[in-house]
Image (cartoon, coloured by chain):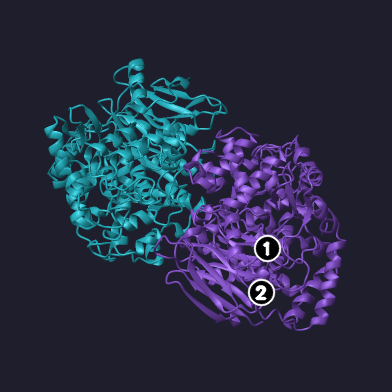
Chain colours: A purple, B cyan
Amino acid sequence: MSGKVFRINMTNLSVNIEEFPQKWEGLGGRGLTSTIVAQEVPPTCHPLGANNKLVFAPGLLTGTPAANSGRMSAGAKSPLTGTVKESNAGGTAGQMLARMGIRALIIEGQPTTDAFYGLHVSKDGVTIREETGLVGRGNFAVIETLMERVGKKVGVLSIGIAGELKMASANISVRDPEGKIRSHGRGGLGAVMGSKNIKCITIDDGGAPGLTIADPETFKAASRSFSKSLLAHPVSGEGLPTFGTNVLVNVINEAGGLPTRNFRYGQSEGHDNFSGETMREVILARGGKPRHGCHPGCIIQCSQVYPDKEGTYLTSGFEYETIWGFGAHSGVENLDYIAMADNLMDDIGVDSIETAVAVGVAMDAGVIPFGDGAAAVKLIKEIGEGTPLGRILGNGAASVGRAYGMTRIPVVKGQAIPAYDPRAIKGIGITYCTTPMGADHTAGYAVASNIMGIGGQVPPLGKEGQVELSRTLQMVTAAVDSTGLCVFVAMALADDPEAMPAVVQMINARYGVSLTAEDLVLLGRKILLTEREFNLAAGFTNQNDRLPEFFREPLPPHDAVWDFTGEEIDEFWNF
Amino acid sequence: MSGKVFRINMTNLSVNIEEFPQKWEGLGGRGLTSTIVAQEVPPTCHPLGANNKLVFAPGLLTGTPAANSGRMSAGAKSPLTGTVKESNAGGTAGQMLARMGIRALIIEGQPTTDAFYGLHVSKDGVTIREETGLVGRGNFAVIETLMERVGKKVGVLSIGIAGELKMASANISVRDPEGKIRSHGRGGLGAVMGSKNIKCITIDDGGAPGLTIADPETFKAASRSFSKSLLAHPVSGEGLPTFGTNVLVNVINEAGGLPTRNFRYGQSEGHDNFSGETMREVILARGGKPRHGCHPGCIIQCSQVYPDKEGTYLTSGFEYETIWGFGAHSGVENLDYIAMADNLMDDIGVDSIETAVAVGVAMDAGVIPFGDGAAAVKLIKEIGEGTPLGRILGNGAASVGRAYGMTRIPVVKGQAIPAYDPRAIKGIGITYCTTPMGADHTAGYAVASNIMGIGGQVPPLGKEGQVELSRTLQMVTAAVDSTGLCVFVAMALADDPEAMPAVVQMINARYGVSLTAEDLVLLGRKILLTEREFNLAAGFTNQNDRLPEFFREPLPPHDAVWDFTGEEIDEFWNF
């Protein structure tokens, strides 16, 4: 598994190109970013200081023709949670790095002046130039400028104003195939990039050697089988392509687990106003695109292009969790306002889950009324203006809760709880508590089993089996996050006995190794333990693996409560 | 040790009067508040939620004629630090409660409406009445209104607007003998009172039985000896009465430990502009009072009345740490602006240390320029107006640092580091790290030994002996904080071999018991362990017993760095 590591030191603006070392053999994506952070970042350092490092790593299959393999991981110590953090995204950057044989970009140190810089990555190395002229510009303008300067196909990683201002919900934007934006969303990695005074990274893979595949024939066969599995599964083959992730509004509402008005209710009366079904109708009526891939080679295409009433582009990558955060959590039952907010968040560069939850908490504090879409959009603009209120919001839901002296703050380890109420869908509650990332549904998506019966049914309202379910899912997910495959392949992996062998075969054929499915799960297990160890050394304890107190209140309609004891939750780590 | 506990439940607005229980025998002040919090408050509860409790307890000698014995402790889980918290204050309330035989007020639960209440405590019990009319009023107006209503001698505990808004730096104001204000300052206990919707507590000790002293003759002799010790010591007998605590500006500047411009330098060029010597001259020239006691029976009288140019009252209880926070830390080298700020902070009800440090951090973030006194006063007004910027500031220094994405945030466990740089005065650094309270100089005032040679000299710049020094001081201080004696008696306790026996004799004579000095130290030891245990159960670890990373930078003029390893610091708890 050869390759290069590009190491960029921002203290002295130097670059070092290293051979991919033996000790990281077999690692890619999350496995690689978390290992590098664990080995090289002092766990107790300030996340915005010179001792933190920002790592980008394409997955093990990223850059190959495998379906849905275009993801790249970004990792660092998170300024939002204080934990190790991995966040993966689509877009074109990961595949370009992979084709150049770059296994990881490691950005370390910190300039001592206020100047902002851009990195340009090509097969020849990295150049650093001052980009202070781009400071204060939104992500869309930055991407446009860089496309004009470097070329239409340039890969771009950039931060918006939130990242420059080092806000804890700042994300890192990734150019998608159409010049729009995907995001390394969660955990404030954009603030880490901002703390290193990097406004943007451009990638030009011209003249790249391309990937070598050790056994092309086997790869092709496995890849074909894998694609078949994805397309045959009702979720990845039908639900997601048709309605996008927003198919979940009606599903989760029906289950009584759609957190409404800052987690007071499990159902929203107005759910039809912002459901995936409604969204599809609006998109079709306005001449938008109901299907759209976030990276070349995606065959699920859960993204879409949502236009305004005049048919002009309004947003893309319009996800369930974002729509939930405004629609149900904040009561803004109007897809146009939510799409405006989504586009603004992309431009300013903030995580849409963290920000949507923060807006709902601000509504609960009385800053603006519940349901006021125009006021919500105005709040988000304040983030981009860096006003004091914008700073409060841009630092996330916990920041809003602290500023307004609230007790009803839906976060774990400082990160906002997304669109699934843990009282009504208990497996996801275990994931929120235990994942080393802070509340993150993607870390072990127990919703699939609790609500959709994928990979077997574990009833959502009971405690039985949830810890084991979340543990298995978190191990598999940590492995999937290391392959560069999109997390939505997990549905097929769970239900189709041929899918996992196909993934293993693709990895083996790519690298000329001979792993087993068991090895992949063991990889996921090891990643979890590496991440957990970092967090413990940073000062986290079992007491941080808990939901906020208010989840002991019953949630209508099931009047479900969060009834796990600490001891029961801590069983998670007993492996 | 008989007495009563008044228990007020704010969920159902009920009061229960209990006999002082056997299990709390021998406890008063901090020993009692910390024990009650540890026994009755779930360590992981939200500090602003219904499960937290706010406890007031006079010290073991409070209400007796012993010199400087008028202190009362307040305790709860702190919304600023998340730790157990004790903060003691002068004023008249403690002595009044003690004379009525009330050993503790325990306030628990939480109303479910927005109505605010007042408690009235008399020998007959507690009455609760709605005081929504006082909401939005500053502490001075509240005290005036209550004096008019209840009588000139009424004891008052109240919160300002900061407490109503549940800001984490909100304090609890205590009426002093002249109708001015002393404060349970640190750790946001005012927000806990606000979270229980209590605007004020009035105390009327009319008809109180008064204290019984088991052996009045012995008490009188010990008390006389104790007073002699206090007056004979150069600090409590001369330095503090002459210049107030602000005598320290020149002393600490000379030592190179006066944190200047957000802890960048250890000396301030303009120190003469705000020193105790200068302050005394100004007070005398304007017809103010250079000496003034915070409670009846104080013979040190380190407080003062500072008038403006026209001779009108501007502030009192004008402490070194507050003056440092504006003068050196923020560069506002003008006592009049600092006095204005001090008075405003009393009225709004915020801790002056936390707020002064927060203002300096905001200056470092570029919110206002360093040294701009008028702008600093305006910032503080914003706290009282509850603007977004006011919320950021009112939640303390860590809140400002987070909002502005900073790494240079001088806090330990979320609480602002006060006026002594731990690099140049290393013993106090160990206290900042290890006290269960978050950064708090009063918890183990190693400055006395490091800089003034009190109780023997431990050189300030070396590591040797600092852990042992801080440990001894923290044990003694926890005991002194339980007696109701002012912390400034500690100088005499350290240097005069007759002082500690006098204190022990007073306690023995008061209660008819036969403790030894060793017993008092053991009491202090036990209190520390009780507090530590609470914090560990709340999720704190050794990693929280650390100074921020930036203290590894050298501090001029000594170029001293914080060079303790984690293991060396953790030795503190090895007892």
Residue at position x 39%, y 51% in the image: B365
Q: In this view, does A529 lie to the left or right of B415?
A: right
Residue B150 x, y percent position in the rendering: 35, 17
The residue wearing badge 2 is A98
User: Callout 2: residue from which chain?
Assistant: A
- Viewer-proximal residue, A440 or B157? A440
Along the viewing direction, whichever of A62 and B207 lies nearer the viewer: A62
A91 left or right of B284 in image: right
State whether residue B44 appears in this view. Answer: no
Letter of the chain that mark 1 sits on in the rendering: A
| Residue at the spot 22% in from the left edge and 28% down from the top edge | B313
Q: What residue type is labelled 2?
A: Ala
Q: In which quarter of the image is residue A291?
A: bottom right
Question: In the displayed structure, would residue B105 be above or below residue A32?
Answer: above
Q: In this view, does B377 lie above or below A428?
A: above
Residue ID at (51%, 38%): A404
Q: Which of marks 2 and 1 is nearer the N terminus?
A: 1
Q: Nearer the viewer, residue B291 or A34?
A: A34
Residue A236 picture quarter: bottom right
Tag 1: residue type?
A: Gly
A89 and A309: which one is in front?
A: A309
